Image (tube, rainbow, N blue to C red):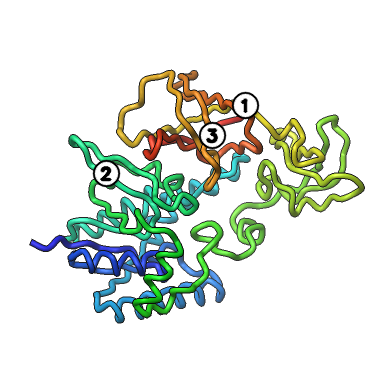
């Protein structure tokens, strides 16, 4: 019996080639274009319309059905409201992690299974392994494109029903396959930016939903060096957009004093204030569903595409986790994710609570 797979088809080259590979492997493929954000200006409308038009053309060329489904309501409730809460609290959230957990591997999965699908598939660069009744999340062959950092919060049930056809391919190989199959997006630029904001100006977008509270920019010794436009617009380690200059090395954000609405800065990208050897993480999720025995030595990333860093995990107060790195880490930002690895497997991760 042929296995039915619903594939998230976005208009990008990765999901298009995933469709090619699934067909070659004998799956019964149905493409699904997900609309996760209601357009609020002409720019959004044009971008979404272009994505849909390309997805329709890919589906036509590959002779697979294409459905369009609107998850905008689920996105607002499960992802965007959390995103706003985090910014109000002075943190720097990573909505792509939540989007994967709540939309692509929950809302989309529920929809696909209700429609009779056996599995879902996406164009993510990751791998999935099943062994002795458990499912494991593995890194992709293309280490530069590996997206397990954004997938660490997915549960066993979702992973067991998911396929990642690009697991063994590099990005150049994906583009070459798209070209060979005459797909219209074989050389289309990869999308960048937060999933629902796209490439538009972040500050302008955020100001629509959160009122800005301008305040002072200070050095660590308390000297005022400028004015910020609102703490929510800045993240630890940021250099661009501070609006302060002067002689010598450039300024970098080193912290936020939320009580006094002050942005703290230092001079020089390697200032000691930008480095910490440890962090505290909460909102932990382990791929195997049970936490590993602690203490544990492994590797970790505190941002996408970062080279894995050797670290040691130990229990902390209130169910939190302490991560001690062998080498000091630059610009640890509260609200971002820390993701753990052992060799080629992603163990899970958590949200950075604070640097220590």
- Quarter the N terminus occupies: bottom left
Q: Is residue 313 above or below residue 211?
A: above
Q: Nearer the viewer, residue 25 or 113?
A: 25
Q: CA distance from mark 2 to mark 1?
A: 33 Å
Between discs 2 and 1, the one toward the N terminus: 2
Which callout, 1 or 3, points to the residue nearer the camera? 3
Identify the residue shown where x is 74% and y is 48%.
239
Q: Position of residue 160 (x, y in %)?
A: 24, 46
Point out residue 15 in the picture as x, y percentages from the top left corner.
Answer: 37, 65
**Residue at image x 58%, y 64%?**
199
Tell which circle, 3 or 2, labels the residue nearer the N-terminal end: 2
Secondary structure at badge 2 equals strand
Q: Secondary structure at mark 1?
A: strand
User: What secondary structure is found at the residue carrying circle 3?
Assistant: strand
Horizontal side of residue 205 vs 242, given as left or right: left
Q: Earlier in the sequence, mark 1 or mark 3?
A: 1
Residue 353: x and y, percent? 55, 31
Q: Residue under circle 2? A: 129
Mark 1 neighbour class, 10 Å CA radius: few under 14, some 14 to 19, many 20 or more: some
How far apart are the two marked residues, 1 and 3, measured between alpha carbons? 11 Å
Which residue is farthest left?
1
How many tags in the picture? 3
Q: Nearer the viewer, mark 2 or mark 1?
A: 2
Q: Nearer the viewer, residue 126 or 156?
A: 126
Would you place residue 225 above or below residue 208 in this image? Answer: above
Of the numbered discs in the image, which one, if any, rests on residue 277? 1
Q: Is residue 62 left or right of residue 303?
A: left
For the residue carrying disc 2, how many other residues have a C-alpha within 10 Å: few (<14), some (14-19), or many (20+)? few
Dots 2, 1 in contact, CB < 8 A: no
Task: Identify the disc placed on residue 309.
Answer: 3
Which residue extends farthest right? 247
The residues tagged by marks 3 and 2 sit, at their Cα atoms, a distance apart of 24 Å
């Amino acid at each position: 019996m042929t296995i039915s797979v619903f594939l998230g088809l976005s208009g990008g080259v990765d999901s298009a080639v995933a469709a090619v590979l699934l067909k070659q492997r004998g799956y019964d493929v149905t493409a699904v274009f997900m609309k996760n954000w209601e357009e609020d200006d002409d720019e959004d409308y044009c971008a979404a319309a272009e994505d849909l038009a390309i997805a329709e053309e890919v589906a036509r060329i590959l002779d697979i059905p294409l459905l369009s489904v609107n998850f905008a309501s689920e996105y607002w409730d499960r992802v965007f409201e959390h995103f706003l809460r985090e910014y109000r609290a002075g943190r720097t959230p990573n909505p792509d992690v939540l989007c994967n957990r709540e939309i692509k591997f929950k809302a989309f999965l529920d929809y696909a299974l209700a429609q009779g699908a056996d599995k879902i598939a996406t164009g993510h660069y990751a791998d999935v392994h099943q062994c002795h009744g458990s499912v494991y999340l593995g890194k992709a062959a293309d280490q530069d494109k590996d997206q397990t950092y954004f997938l660490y919060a997915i549960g066993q049930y979702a992973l067991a029903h998911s396929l990642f056809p690009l697991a063994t391919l590099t990005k150049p190989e994906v583009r070459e396959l798209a070209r060979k199959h005459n797909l219209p997006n074989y050389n289309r630029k990869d999308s960048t930016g937060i999933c629902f904001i796209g490439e538009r100006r972040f500050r302008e977008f955020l100001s629509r939903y959160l009122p800005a509270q301008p305040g002072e920019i200070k050095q660590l010794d308390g000297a005022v060096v400028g004015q910020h436009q609102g703490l929510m617009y800045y993240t630890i380690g940021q250099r661009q957009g501070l609006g302060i200059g002067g002689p010598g090395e450039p300024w970098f954000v080193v912290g936020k004093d939320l009580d006094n609405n002050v942005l703290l800065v230092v001079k020089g990208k390697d200032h000691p204030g930008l480095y910490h050897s440890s962090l505290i993480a909460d909102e932990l999720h382990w791929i195997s569903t049970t936490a590993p025995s602690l203490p544990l030595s492994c590797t970790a990333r505190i941002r996408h595409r970062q080279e894995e860093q050797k670290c040691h995990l130990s229990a902390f107060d209130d169910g939190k986790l302490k991560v001690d790195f062998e080498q000091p880490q630059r610009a640890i930002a509260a609200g971002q994710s820390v993701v753990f690895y052992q060799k080629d497997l992603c163990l899970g991760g958590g949200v950075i609570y604070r640097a220590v």
